[in-house]
Image (cartoon, rainbow, N blue to C red):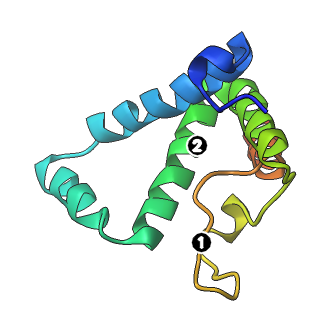
């Protein structure tokens, strides 16, 4: 198994992960100073981080990078040997052990992409 390093990813997967990270920049660019302080404070909450990362994936898809995010998401799950763990669809729900999923899983990414195509 090769580690999940940028240099070990295909071009599409690299675009997906970089697109996700740049989506954080887009998100911060749309915040005012008090909201930015709120993000910093929010980092003490796992639930807040789950919602923030889910929203970051949504921003990435909204900017037309969904297929790249999907390629990266699939690669991560193949490498970790899990197709769909409780992903973004469960961001507001506990999974029995108090943990929340942070990033959209491939099925959720495809669902969001389809929803955006119809609007």
Determine which quarter of the picture holds residue 58.
top right
- What residue would you read off at disc 1? 100
Tell me the CA gap for discs 1 and 2.
Answer: 15 Å
View extreme (top): residue: 11
Relative depth, front residue between 100 and 24: 100
Image position of 107 (left or right of 119): right
| Residue 77: x %, y % from top left | 79, 45
| Residue 14: x %, y % from top left | 63, 19
Q: Are marks 1 and 2 in contact (CB under 8 Å)?
A: no
Q: Is residue 42 above or below residue 27?
A: below
View extreme (left): residue: 33
Tell me the tag on residue 57. Answer: 2
View extreme (front): residue: 1
Mark 1 burial class by Cα count in 10 Å: few <14, some 14-19, many 20+ = many
**Which label sits in the foreground, 1 or 2?**
1
SS at badge 2 = helix
| Residue 96: x %, y % from top left | 69, 88
Image position of 69 (left or right of 110): left
* Residue shown at the point (64%, 34%) measured from the top left: 61
Q: Is residue 93 above or below residue 115?
A: below
- Of mark 1 and mark 2, the one earlier in the sequence is 2
């Amino acid at each position: 198994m090769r580690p999940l390093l940028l240099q070990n990813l295909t071009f599409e997967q690299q675009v997906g992960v970089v697109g996700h990270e740049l989506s954080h920049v887009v998100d911060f660019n749309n915040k005012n100073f008090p909201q930015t302080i709120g993000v910093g404070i929010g980092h003490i909450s796992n639930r807040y981080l789950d919602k923030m990362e889910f929203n970051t994936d949504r921003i990435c898809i909204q900017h037309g990078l969904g297929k790249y995010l999907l390629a990266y998401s699939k690669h991560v799950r193949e490498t970790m040997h899990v197709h769909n763990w409780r992903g973004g669809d469960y961001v507001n729900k506990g999974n029995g052990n108090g943990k929340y999923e942070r990033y959209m899983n491939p099925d959720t990414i495809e669902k969001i992409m389809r929803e955006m195509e119809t609007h």
